[in-house]
Image (spheres, coloured by chain):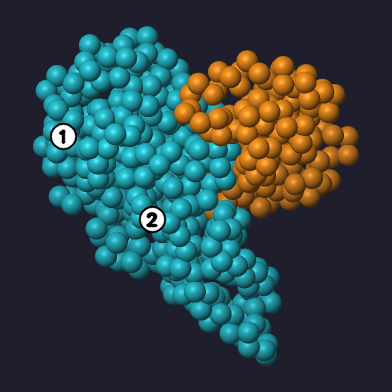
Amino acid sequence: MSDTRSLDEIKSDLAERVEQIMTRYPTARSAIMPSLDLAQQEYGSVDELTYRAIAELLDVPEIWVFEVASFYSLYDRSKMGRHHIRLCTNLPCMLRGAEALMQHLQQRLEVEPGETTSDGSFTLSAVECLGACEVAPVLMAHAQYHGDLTVEKLDALLATFAAQPAEEMS
Amino acid sequence: MSEQVLLKNIDNPSAHRIETYEASGGYQGLRTVLRNFAPDEVIEEVKSANLRGRGGAGFPTGLKWSFVPKDSPLPRYLCCNADEGEPGTFKDRILMERDPHQLIEGMIIAAYAIGCRTAYLYIRGEYGLSIEHCQQAIDEAHALGYLGPNILDSEHSLEIHIHKGAGAYICGEETALLESIEGRRGQPKLKPPFPAVAGLYECPTVVNNVETLACLPHLFSRGGEWFASIGPDHSPGPKLFCISGQVKRPGVYELPMGRTLGEMLEDYGGGALTGQFKAGIPGGVSAPMFPRSEFDIKMDFASLAEAGSMLGSAGIIGLDETASIPQVARRVTEFFNHESCGKCTPCREGLTWAAKILRRIEAGRGQRGDVEQLEMLCGGIFGKSFCALGDGAAWALGAALKHFRHEFDALIIPQSKAG
């Protein structure tokens, strides 16, 4: 979240790289998605100040940025836990036990899918197909895939995450 | 095992590097094209090789290219659809992660055929390693003169930019994908106009799938006749199949088309995890399933279409005797409901309603008339929206109801009220 940065600070953080992105497209509007991605990598999530900063850098209406940010599921519009676990629950994973793994995660973390633990360390999400069905059931965390999951593997993964700060994982 | 073309180097840990690719014949197809073929001749060769799109619809690739107007003063665009999201599909990810130069070389050939100087590679945001390896491949190709101005001293120039998706299944639909590159919400547009005439930035545009483009270097280094000689006449060329679900050996397999669904699941997938198979889905969850009694169906574009299903993304999903079809139908319908972009009422409202009924049935609280209600909803969604998302949802659900009606009926409360 960019809550510790002012609008001008966000703009100056992003300006050079946003300009670079704009060279890849004939219209500024096309740079909205890569700019949101950039901001999310920089601050962990995106918010209204980010939309305004991007809109001003691209010289496009702020609503154009918001309507994109709110359509695509990978843009996090609220603060996520330090470790965001996205467990695939789609058919190929479901057929290999994803629902039981989801229940296990809910019990271990004491949250429902879509929620963050009260200490802010884990966010749990049920997601659609991650395109790695050959290793189903599979989850994504810190941009890495972890496949052929079992309850034991999940527990080991949670222990690894809990022991390390998020910055070292990505 | 038949010859491995697309997966030839897949187990080589350095297959994604250009040195490895060139050493195994990479970029020879492009050299042949630039030396011996005019752009129109490239299109003719792809037409006569009968390459059909590997993304889902199976449309003839050369024909698609030939729709690009020759006399337009506008720039032409090539977009590669790497927004692989059809559940049960992971072949494009494997190609991009492990041997991405096949795709980059294919894009350079396709761009030459249609006169394109700027191409976009739209990769779904979750595919981090694919994005990394494709960007590295683009940079390597640049350094050796396969990309940039005057490729290999020809008149052909090309830049390829990666556009990273952000988690929307619908962007695999070509008009939604173009909207997304333009920086909008990924909502499909009514066709016509087709992208070939008015696509990206209202300019002539071709959208091709990763595997389709990855076929091109091989097609040109070994010739269209060689390509057409693989597999059945109407569905030729090397083909990747993804096998997943309740099978012993899930994975990507390269085979000619025309094997049966049963062979794929038993011989390559290694058989059912538990007991016997109950059903198989041939081409991603949008493709209607077949019960075990129909496992002799041939896995090619024409045979599956004739049998009322489709090859789709060639994502084969095995369902064994432990699978509950109402549960499968519920999960698949929830997926489509979640991914509906919300633009067309039949898809948006119909799928919400269908998912609600299916959850009730799965929980054992089905009411008399629920199955008929679902059938009515399928008819009300199919063919009544801009894109194929709702069609796929209705089609898949319809097949589950048709072949496994008894499993749904068993969950209906006998004394319940109708509807």
* Residue B158 image-quadrant placement: top left
| Residue B5 place in picture, x, y as percent | 26, 31
Element carrying mark 2: loop
Q: Which image quarter holds the C terminus of chain A?
A: top right
Q: In this picture, is A62 found above or below B220?
A: below
Looking at the image, is B197 positioned above or below residue B277? above
Q: Color used for chain B?
A: cyan
User: In x, y percent, where is residue B195?
Assistant: 36, 45
In screen coordinates, is B372 left or right of B64? right
Residue at 23% from the left image edge and 32% from the top image edge: B113
Chain letter of mark 1 equals: B
The residue wearing badge 1 is B40
Considering every residue shown, the one lying at the far right of the view is A118
Residue type beneath disc 1? Asp
Q: Which of marks 1 and 2 is nearer the N terminus?
A: 1
Q: For chain A, what colour was chosen? A: orange
Front position in the image: B190 or A114: B190
Residue A154 appearing in the image? no
Q: Name above or below for residue B263 compared with residue B241.
A: below
SS for tag 1?
helix
Q: Residues within 10 Å of mark 1 (few under 14, many from 20)?
A: some
Q: Quadrant of the N terminus of chain A?
A: top right
| Total number of numbered discs in the rendering | 2
The answer to whether dots 1 and 2 both sit on one chain is yes
As displayed, is residue B45 above or below residue B149?
below
| Residue B98 picture location, percent across and down | 42, 25
Mark 2 sits on what residue? B191
Say few, some or many: other residues with alpha carbon within 10 Å of mark 2 (under 14 / 14 to 19 / 20 or more). few
Question: Which residue appears at 30% of the width and 50% of the height?
Answer: B58
Residue at image point 37% right, 9% down: B143
